[in-house]
Structure formats: C-alpha cells, structure tokens
Amino acid sequence: MKNKSAKVLTPTRREVLKYTGAAALAAPFVNRAWAQATEINMLAWYGHGEPDIVGEFEAANNVKFKPKYYAGGDNMLALIAQSPPGTYDVILSDGEFVQQLNAAGYIENLDAGDYNFDDMLYDDFKQFPGHWKDGTLHSVMVRCGHLGVSYNTSAVSAEEAMSYKCFWKPELKGKVGHFDWHLPSLGMMSLYNGNGANLWNLDDAGWAKVQETTMSLRPQVGGFFDYGGTFNSLKNGEMTAMCGIGDWITGVLEKDGAPVASVVPKEGGIQWTESYCIGKGSQHAAMVKKFIQYMLSPEGQVHSAQMAAYPGFAITKGGRALLNEKDPKEAQRTGQVDGMANDPISLIKDGRIHYRNIPVNQTLEDWNDFWSEYKNA
Amino acid sequence: MADKKHESTKPVKRSIDIYALTWRMPIIIWQFLFFVGPLIFMIAMSFFLVENYRMVEAFEMKNWVKMLGRNYFWDSYFYTLGLASAATVLATVLAFPASYALAFKMSETARRWAVFFLIIPFFTSYLVRTFSWYVILAESGVINAILSYVNLGPYTMLNTKFGTMVGYMTLTLPLVIILQTLSLSQIDRNLIGAAHNLGCGRIRTVFTVIVPLAKVGLIIGAVFCFILSFGDFVSPYYLGGSKPPTLPIMIIDTTKSGQQWPRAAVVAVMMMVTLFSVAFAAIALAYRKRSQ
C-alpha cells in the first residue's frame, strides 16, 4: 500500500517529460483562451454575422460577433426599442429606416472623415437620403441590390420579363408568387402604373389605382412566401414568376444552376440599401468603426458581393475592381463591370432605379391593411 | 354519538386533504404559470397600445374595434374554422378503419408495434416533415413523376388547400389513430359478440355498438385534431402558400408589421374563445348520455 502511494506521488522521469511536453503543446490554446475575444453585438438581417462576412475581421482583430437577426425594418426598430441602450454595438439597417433610428436616438453620430466616401461608385451613395441630418452623418451605406421581375427562364422570355405586365400572362395563372412583404410588391405595382420616381408619393387617386392594379393580379397569385418559401418555390418550379424580389434570391439559385433570373423592367426597379450604424451607448464604438471601414474596403466589399445568404452589389470602386479580379464570373453575372448594359450604377444614372422608401402620404399601416385584404381576396 | 363520530374523523379528513393537495399542487402551479397566467396577460395585452414600436399599458378598445371591424379578419376566421373542421372530419374518417383494424384484427404484439410506428413521426421536427412534402408534392416531385408514366398530370398540389390538408394530416392523423385505438381497445368484446348473436351484421355492429361505446375516445381524438389544425401555422403557410392566410398566419403578419402585438392578442383571444367553445361543446356531447 505504502509503495503504491509513493509511486503515485513520485512521477518517473518518463512521466515528467511526457506531461511537460503535453503542457508545452497546449500552451498556445491556453493563451488564446486567456486572451478572450471581445464580443460585438450585432443586429442585422440574416447572414451578416456569419463567417463568410465577418470571419476574416474577427481573426484579425480578436473579436467575436454575436449576431441577432431580424426580418424587416419594423422588427428591427421593435428589437431596439425593447432593449436598453448599448445592447447593440453595430446595427445593419435598411436605408429607408435610418432616419427613424436617428429620430428615436438609437444610433451614434459618425465622423464622415473616418470613411472613404471618395471611393464610392456613385455620388448619391455619399449623401444617401436619410443618412445625414444637418450635416451630420449617422449611417454608412455598405451594399445594395435591385428588385424587379424575377422569373423562370423556361416560362418567361427575357423580352416578356422587361415589363411587369408579364405577371398577368395567362400561362402564369397560379404561378406568380409574392415575397410576403407589402413594400416591394406594392412599390412594383406603383411603378407599373407609371408613377416612376413618385412611386412612394401617391395621392388618394394614385393609391386607389395601385390597389386596383394589385387586386387585378390576385387571380394569378399562387402563394405568399417568406425567404425559405420563395427560395423553394422558385427552385422546384412551383412558381415561375415572383413579385417583390430580385437577384438577392435568384442570384443564389442561379449560381446553383437553376433556370431563374432577375431583371429591371422598363417601368423601373427598386433598390434595397443596407447601411451600418453604431448603436447608441456602444462600449465598442471604436471597433465597430473599424469594422465599417473594413466592410467598405475592397476585401469587405468582395465578401459582401459574394455573401452566401444573399448577394449584394459592391458600392465602391475598389470593391468592384477587386471583385472583377477575384470573381470575374460573378461580376459579369451581376453586371458589375464598367460599360455593361445592366451595370447597376448605369441603371441608377438612367433613372430606372428608385430607392426603396416608406409611403409618403399613407401610413405603413394603410399599406399593411391593404396587403392583408389582398391576401384574403 | 353521531357528533362524536364526526369529531373523531375531523383530523383524519384534514390530513387527507393536505395529502391530496400536495399531490395536486404541481399541476395547479403548472397550469397557473404556463396557462392561466399567460392567458390573463394575453387578454390584458389586447387592450394595450403600441407607440413608437413599444407597447404601452392602457385599457383601450382600439385594437378590438380595428381587428373585428375588418372584413379580412372574418374571412380569415371562417376560412380557418372551415379548414380545421374539414381536417377533423377527414382525420376521424381516415383514422377509424386503421384504428378498428388495430383494435380488433391485430394481435397484441402487432398492435404495440403499430402504435410504436405511429409515435415515431413525432421524433422528428414537424417543420422538417412538412418541408419533406415539397419533394413529394411538387410539380416536379415524386407523385407527378409516377403519374407521368400513365400520361397524367402534372397536378398542382403545393400552395393549395389540398397541400394544407396534407400538412394537417401529417400533424394529426397518427395522434387521432392512437386515441381511437386506445378507445376501441377498451370495448368489452362480449357486447360485440352479443350483438352478433342477436343477428346484428358487421356494419350495423360498428355503427350501433362500437361507435357509441367508443364515443368518448372518438370525440376526444376529433377535438385534438381540431385544436391542432386550428392553431397550426406551418402547413397553411408552407404547403398552402398562405393563400388565403389562416388566423395563425394573421398573428405573424400583425406582429411583423408595426409590432402590433396587442392586435395579434385580439386574434389570439378570438382563437382561444373558439377553441374553448368547441372543446366544451365536444366534451358535453361525449359525456351527455353518462350524465343522464
């Protein structure tokens, strides 16, 4: 018995060497765990806190993003309203909701000098509507995409897709799907009615006409879908045309070989815009500033353009150049090549793209009420 | 003497009450914490207001007036009621032959295995089971591929009421079969034998002897089917294409837009009132004869 305990307490030379070696090998991991990464709380649409976007930045700066995902601007505002100040360090907002974030005091002022606005592909992006107030910057646009006619190329020709009229094609009865959000779909109906740049600024007659046009589409509609449902119904051919979306969904499917595409029709398309803000009271404002700078850098822009969840356009010259260099196929597919006919910047300059907004003369509730009525019709 | 006897039993009675109460307490606490409490809060919430995306405590009728005053609410209400009723009838009718066979025509061992296989679907997520129907029901799916060999189809099954009904059956049919089987298994076989001896045919025996004797179980199975279908969001959304939306989809829509939780609470309260009414009416029907 005595001998046994002595053996336990007195390690052999071989054991000493073995344990010393193991300790030495484990040291780097111990050190890494010791220097714990700073947590950055992010509020964003799905996909923005995933490794394909933030992985490189996390590794370089010893931070860890903790994303909370939302679906829709209303949902985003509600999540912030229900949380104490400082809960979210970085907020990704739809462009049209930035002014509401600012009005409610949910975001910090930004120093415009911190961001390379000179590299923006288009002047509007430097002074994006709602991102500045009284000369102060509140949010930095980082990506965008265009919404128009999304279709199955075996059911709708490229020529037909050049007008929203294709949604009423008799052969598509029961095959037209809606992304289940009133804003883009009703915006498209407004464009089809010829409202152009005034698509959100509708008087009573204009709003009544939009409702009438939308109701006339109802017999064609096969379903109302969320992101997953939209994705599936286009992929399995249940829906052959989709209203309210764009390349942010068909792009993922197209890259996967599905016969789908999105175009900006002659009546015009709608731009979704995503911008980063620093949450009010954030304890990591300096790191978030660095992250926004990273997302505007060529590398960040390429990650954003290739985002696994949903692709977006690069908005800086450096980003576009690097995308063409690293992934020319994707740059070609999305028209992000200078001089291409469907170059998104050219489409904006030609006046065919209108930034998504909220209704000017009606409330969001009015639009939502009508949307519920439409779905039940 | 009687008084003395009464006095002597008092302490015993009290101790029995405490003992019984101790055993009842967990379910009482559970029901209060997870049913009565949230229900009271939901009813109260239906009178709150939303200001700047934040709920404000109030006692206003605005949400009730707004929701009950909209035609689309009532369209959705009667559509949901109709779908759930149809699912209840369908599940009850489809389940009965299977339950009958399990209860009367199979050995004890085979019945145990059958019930085990009926429980297995509940091991996987209902959402996953619903999405798996995409592969089967899609126009390019399994059923249409088989039908194409006999020059039939393709038929549209997804994003239709049929799709919704398939989802409801996925959710409820195994449960209804299990409940019916348990009920049918408890019927005294001598009564069936007596019916046959008195010249009652097989079909007549089913409807005049077996169904009345298993009434409670059959009705409880139907009620479960109604409750689950009426409150289901997944099938009408993913297999029915939300076309038109049912009340659970309306709850989601209402909360998504403007974070109108109080208005969603109005819809939820209306659903609860309907479910309570149906459940109490069904239980009254099930036990009517017994109380007489």
Image (cartoon, coloured by chain):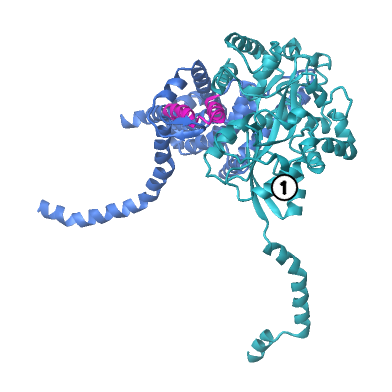
Chain colours: A cyan, B blue
At 55% from the left edge and 19% from the top edge, which residue is drawn? A366
Is B201 in the magenta? no
Residue B28 versus residue B285: which sits nearer the camera?
Answer: B28
Q: Quadrant of the N terminus of chain A?
A: bottom right
Q: Relative to residue A136, is residue B26 drawn left or right?
A: left
Which chain contains the residue that carries disc 1? A
Q: Residue most toward the front? A: A135
> Is residue B233 visible in the rendered structure shown here?
yes
At 69% from the left edge and 21% from the top edge, which residue is drawn? A177
Give the percent coordinates (x, y) of residue A138: 64, 37
Give the percent coordinates (x, y) of residue B98: 58, 32
> Is residue B210 visible in the rendered structure shown here?
no
Query: Residue B273 sits in which quadrant?
Result: top left
Residue B199 versus residue A356: which sits nearer the camera?
Answer: A356
Q: Relative to residue B237, is residue A159 drawn left or right?
A: right
Residue marked by disc 1 = A290
Asked if residue A25 is positioned above or below residue B8 in the image, the reply reads: below
Q: Identify the amino acid type marked 1.
A: Lys
Q: Quadrant of the C terminus of chain A?
A: top right
Is B265 in the magenta? yes
Residue A95 versus residue B276: which sits nearer the camera?
Answer: A95
Give the percent coordinates (x, y) of residue B250: 54, 26
At 42% from the left edge and 31% from the top edge, which residue is drawn? B48
At 70% from the left edge and 29% from the top edge, which residue is drawn? A128
Q: Residue most toward the bottom? A: A2
Q: Which segment did they paint magenta?
A: B246-274
